[in-house]
Image (cartoon, rainbow, N blue to C red):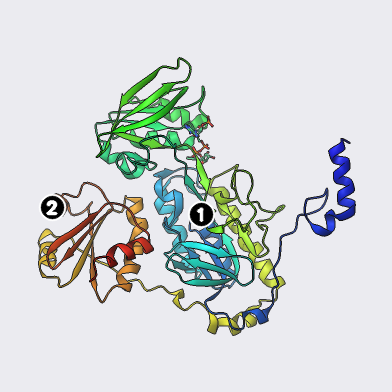
Amino acid sequence: MDIKSVMMAIACALVGGIAGWFVCPGQQLRAWEPPISHELLQSVKNVIPVVVIGSGPAGLTAGMYAARFGYKTLVVTGDKPGGALTETTWVENWSGIEKQLGPDIMQNLQAQAARFGVEFLYDVVAKVDFSKWPYALELEDGTTLHALTVIIASGSSPRKLGVPGENEYWGKGVTTCAVCDAPFHKGKDVVVIGGGDSAVEESLQLAPYARSVTLLVRGDTMRAAATMKKRLEAVDNISVIYSVEVQKIIGNDDEVTGVEILNKKTKEVFTKAVSGVFLAIGHDPNTKMLGGQVELDDHGYIVTLGRSQQTSVAGVFAAGDVQDPVYKQANASVGYGTNAAIDANSFLQHHGFNSEVLRNLEPQYFEAFLQDRIEVAKIENLSDLKELIENTQGLLVVDYYAPTCPSCMQMLPAVEAVAADLKDNVTFVKVDTSESMDIVKEYKVAKIPLLMVYSNGSLLARYNQAMNKHELTEFISSFIE
Ligand code: NDP
């Protein structure tokens, strides 16, 4: 036994088991638990038994299981409903299905969860307060929800390079989503940065559109799976350059025109002319809204205790990429989501939340469990749209989308929710650009999602970025006098 182990053994014998400050051999680290009693709920409004933060495979599965256990369950979708899988194309390793489009998988999963009674709030959790129970979650619009249990399944966000030009040209050629932007690089040269499965996937998605795809790998080898590399080698217009680092992204103010690359072996710096820079350099877990109230590991992933999804706060569970630094697979996330809901059920049962207690609590449930959404009318003919623009009194918002555009489809529920909120002041319509080419040509729609805002026939704004409900409300409200 080394000296450290001896010290630990003595400390464990003296205080460790009582204080729970560190894990002793054979001892399970216990979560911190605030006072929990049914009395504490007496005067609390906006109560929800199970709140899931995030709507990827982990979140939707957790929601489905929790609802199936019989709990009123709310999934707060975040600003990318459906999560990362909605930004991919064909998935061939989703268990039980040979090959299916990522967005379709997520739509099916959401429909399945909804069939068990899961409610969806197309909003973002901005802050949490886990210092006392029931746990408080503040949405971006300022609403506070009170949860008996929380399942954090907020996923991870793509990493950025941190080089000059990256922020300046973000959305103007620099992106992390090939499936969204590949068609804008038809016949052009692009680079993909990274050496993992995502980088290969992005390259394969770009190859049918771009003239050439150059994969820039910082090391001597790629960490992508052998099967993925094989698929890469089979495509003629993809090439790989190893041991290189992008130092700068160059542009002409409007769009990317090239990248400055360092050859790490020769120290030579050269410029490559490209129209697109696709980043695939890994992800960071989304934990900002937790404000440090849940224990994270050195890389920012939520720590779960033992063989459970329990976080360092009792009744708060984590599932999926936000707590998984190793496997990061959609299939694995489904498992974590399942476990988290089972853990949440045990927690609620342990604290006596049987069906009778929950029925008594129903008058305090979150009123807006059913967020108002209205079906936005779809316009298919150019003449109908022209007439609408000319004759609509007050504000008219036209949402251009396509079923194959993930960010458009992710924004659609937010558009429907805002359309319901602002129905007295604003008319919303949508145009499917894949069906209405005459409209696309007439209004020069080159990139989607696109919102065009009119007031009494005059165009006030064209806006080309995806927005969440909060951003959309602020954007549209700024035109209401
Ligand atoms: P990974 O973490 O696997 O790979 C990130 C890559 O980016 C690595 O090659 C890394 O280089 C490189 N990188 C990191 N930082 C920089 C930087 N600053 N500059 C240049 N390169 C950098 O992330 P992925 O997103 O590719 O994959 C995440 C997980 O998702 C994996 O488990 C993967 O298997 C899975 N996945 C599976 C898919 C499938 O099965 N079809 C598709 C996509 C993802 P280095 O190797 O030198 O560290």
The quarter of the picture where residue 201 lies is top left
**Of label 2 and label 1, which has the lower sequence position?**
1
Q: Residue at x 16, y 49 (%)?
A: 444
Picture layout, residue 366 above or below residue 226: below
* Label 2 crowd bin: few (<14), some (14–19), many (20+), radius 10 Å: some
> What residue is pinned by disc 1?
57
Above/below status of 234 relative to 170 = above
Quadrant including the C terminus: bottom left
Per the rendering, the mark at residue 332 is none
Q: Nearer the viewer, residue 374 or 364?
A: 364
335 or 386, which lies in front? 386
Q: Quadrant of the N terminus?
A: top right
Residue found at x 15% / y 54%: 439
Q: Amino acid at mark 2?
A: Asp
Q: Nearer the viewer, residue 470 or 451?
A: 470
Q: As shown in the figure, which amino acid type bears the numbered disc 1?
A: Pro
Question: Which residue sits furthest top?
Answer: 266
Q: Please report contact status of discs 2 and 1: CB closer than 8 Å, yes or no.
A: no
Badge number at residue 438: 2
Q: Position of residue 406 (x, y in %)?
A: 36, 51
Task: Tell me: 215 left or right of 2.
Answer: left
Q: Is residue 452 left or right of residue 319?
A: left
Image-based side of 419 in relation to 73, left or right: left
Mark 1 lies on a secondary structure that is helix
Q: Is residue 98 visible?
A: yes
| Classed neighbour count for the residue bearing mark 1: other residues with Cα under 10 Å, few (<14), some (14–19), many (≥20) | many
